Image (cartoon, helix red, strand yellow):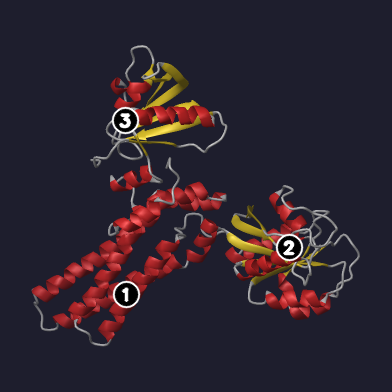
Amino acid sequence: MSLEFETIAAISTPPGEGAIGIVRLSGDEALEIADRVYRSGTKKLINQKSHTLHYGHIENPKTGKTVDEVMVSVMRAPKTFTREDVVEINCHGGITSVNQVLQVVLQFGARLAEPGEFTKRAFLNGRIDLSQAEAVMDLIRAKTDRAMHVALQQLDGNLSTLIRNLRSDILDTLAQVEVNIDYPEYDDVETLTSQLLVEKAKLVKAQIQQLLQTASQGKILREGLATAIIGRPNVGKSSLLNFLLQEEKAIVTEVAGTTRDIIEEYVNVRGVPLKLVDTAGIRETEDIVERIGVEKSRQALANSDLVLLVFNQNEKLTEEDRLLIKATDQNHRIVILNKMDLPNKLDLTKLEELVDPDSIVKTSILTKSGIDKLEEKIAYLFFAGQTGEKDATYVSNVRHIALLNDAESALDDVITGIESGMPVDLVQIDMTRSWELLGEITGDSVQDELLTQLFSQFCLGK
């Protein structure tokens, strides 16, 4: 049964021109409010069956003017996203028409939804848990097919099921401990209880560690791999960016120093989402604007998960190149020898003394050669050539990862406490703490402030 809330409304489609724009209402009075502004002969939406679609017009009763020609979806609780009555008004796409329909339903009883309030109601009404609610945003923001698949698995409850099973195991153990303490039947009950706690703590810890092993891959799939394209001016950094994006995003000229600022774009490489950063060429310069770009490039380098270090193999290795090699020594790095269509002037033997020979890829952006090998190396570097098991449950959310680490730490305290001879009732506190931390992932134990913070990141119509 849903909780009683005000009926809310919001635009659920992106702003701009399109074939369809949707205004969504949710709440106990959604049908009544829609009926106040819906006109289609004598038809009343409140009398229609659930999950049906109806043609008509939206009219402002105060002025008698028709706002738009529409198709209206009627969906009755509890078989809706929010487990409340939901009405979706399908208008002609466009800023004006959709906004006018929204304004009319707000005038006649609805309240403008807060960011993420539809999903928040789905959580509060028990349709989804907190990890599934967060998966909705992951699904919207997915940059690759694989990232979308991971989000869909979480939305389907794969992670929730795993977490709830762990919590159930812990709770069963805690209950058994209470029975052993309150109703001891054996002289060695303390020993048996301690052994039970240690065995269960180690078992749950092992399962948490197994989940955490997917965290690095999951985080990359969710947020993208921060990838800086680094090199001296005019070695082909912007050309590489444009090729990967398949559009002319960066200006390409023979004039060194053309790129004055960093350019960020997402690209899908073999299922790995790269957040590409095309940087200004790193060099000493007297140009004030270019100098600012160079400093931003250094900052991008420091924050990168991966560096694509580009050299022009048509030129000899310079002191600036050597400095860039040194500056990127601590990064995951792929060295790209570009312009292979031109005569080779770079001493490969000297370069291989400075970098791992296996990190080198030869390309020619102009002739489009070597790019496949570059993509293969990127995928292999982070996913051993693939994005993991197709049906594996990935942990990708930073909040979830932190809570799993804290739960693992609490279980370590259980094991350490038992091994050091601490009383069972004190160790039990740490076991309970791990149960509570896991509950924060699914929202079974969560603070109102956290809910407000999480759902404020959503758009208005979701």
Q: Which residue is mark 1?
A: 411
Q: Of label 1 and label 2, which has the lower sequence position?
A: 2
CA distance for labels 3 and 1: 51 Å
CA distance for labels 1 and 2: 54 Å
Above or below: residue 408 compared with residue 8 = below
The numbered mark at residue 67 is none
Quarter of the image with the C terminus is top left
Is residue 383 or residue 7 the one in the foreground? 7
Mark 3 residue type: Gly
The reply to whether residue 309 is in sight is no
Residue 411 quadrant: bottom left
Residue under the image location 37 percent in, 29 percent down: 105
Mark 1 residue type: Leu
Label 3 residue SS: loop
Toward the top, the furthest residue is 41
The numbered mark at residue 109 is 3
Task: Tell which tag, 2 or 3, sits nearer the viewer.
Answer: 2
Asked if marks 3 and 1 touch (Cβ < 8 Å), the reply is: no
Residue 125 location (% of width, % of height)? 28, 44
Residue 406 location (% of width, % of height)? 36, 71
Task: Tell which tag, 1 or 2, sits nearer the viewer.
Answer: 2
Q: Of label 2 and label 3, which has the lower sequence position?
A: 3
